[in-house]
Amino acid sequence: MSIRIAVTGASGFCGGHVARTAAARGAQVVCLGRRPGPQGEHRTWDAAVADPDLTGVDLVVHCAAAVGDPAPGSAAESLMHAVNVAGTQRLLRAAGGRPVVWVGSASVYDPRLDRSLVTEDHPRAGQLNAYGRTKAAGEALALAGGAVVLRPRAVYGPGDTQLLPRLLSRVRAGTLLLPGPDVMLSLTAVENLADACLAAAGWPPGAYNVADAEPYARDLALREVLRAHGVRARIRHLPLPVAHAAARFAQCLPTAEPALSRYAVDQLAHSVVLDTTRARSRGWGPGRTLADYLAEVAAGDRSGRVSPSPLLPRRR
């Protein structure tokens, strides 16, 4: 009998990839969320309101999350807490001891400290926005409940509606302004994250960084992104004090989500490289790279792919 996996947030970017990958490897998939997922059975669940129905489920992969960079005190910030923190409490209560893989974020790491090589023991404090704070609070609950917590950084790939689309939207008059000089950054292909989500069911409880095999030089990576999308633009560097001043001004404006924030500047202006030794020691290894994805974009192929897994059987 095949394993039955519940994937929360399966109608979204990361959850959808996890659901499709699990189904392709022979698992029975139960998609939980407000909208149907791409595979298997659908059970309606609003993480901000009620406990999920996990009847008959063997494993839970929790991808559901409220994302974004909302203005302090906004309704979006309140919703973020309801989904990312209270929703985690509801999920853990319903799981009742079942294994849980909780998809977190490297945004929990303290941005005030050096992040040139970040292990899972890096302090989790000082987050710059509601997303980082609520993900930190949610993962604390998950860790206390015995879950495996994955911490990817800057997830990209087919169906991405956040990371690369937002960057491409910043091109103005043939120029993409970036804060400060070039830095090294970890990125995470969504296929690598999906693979880790399924492999992690057999890992000891605790936190694990998940990222592509090697970090990327920011400017070169973004030049390749622009080229693959057919965008003609040059990259110019904005002095970091100017970028910080612009972010402070933007965050004072009465908008639900500022056009620029301290968090956005931080994500692009400082080297953040994740140490994935702990996950690799469990036999996981990232197989996808940014070059793989961009080659598909340039060729007009956004279908993605499913890689083999040592944990779940492939469909025969």
Image (tube, rainbow, N blue to C red):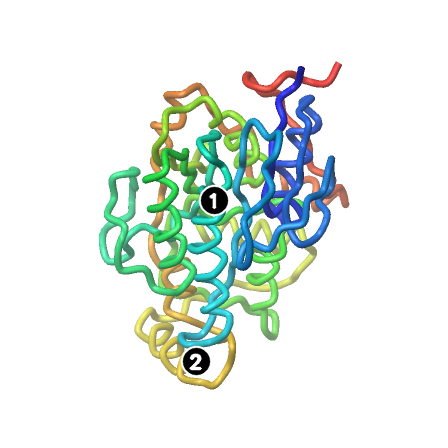
12 horizontally vs 204: left or right: right
Question: Mark 2: which secondary structure?
Answer: helix
Q: Residue at x 33, y 46 (%)?
A: 140
**Quick check: 72 above or below 93?**
below
The quarter of the picture where residue 118 lies is: top left
67 horizontally vs 6: left or right: left
Q: Residue at x 72, y 18 (%)?
A: 315
The span from disc 1 to disc 2 (Cα, nearest Å) is 26 Å
Neighbourhood count class around disc 2 (C-alpha, 10 Å): few under 14, some 14–19, many 20 upward:
some
Neighbourhood count class around disc 1 (C-alpha, 10 Å): few under 14, some 14–19, many 20 upward:
many
* Residue 80: % across, % down: 47, 62
Identify the mark at residue 250; answer none if there is no mark.
Answer: 2
Please report contact status of discs 1 and 2: CB closer than 8 Å, yes or no.
no
Judge whether residue 189 can be spotted in this image. yes
Q: Which residue is mark 1?
A: 187
The quarter of the picture where residue 55 lies is: top right
In the rendered structure, which amino acid carries the disc numbered 1?
Leu
**Quick check: 263 above or below 194?**
below
The quarter of the picture where residue 24 lies is: top right
* Residue 87: % across, % down: 48, 53
Question: Mark 1: which secondary structure?
Answer: loop
* Residue 6: % across, % down: 60, 36
Identify the mark at residue 280; answer none if there is no mark.
Answer: none
Closer to the camera in the image, 233 or 3: 3
Closer to the camera in the image, 148 or 229: 148
In the rendered structure, which amino acid carries the disc numbered 2?
Ala
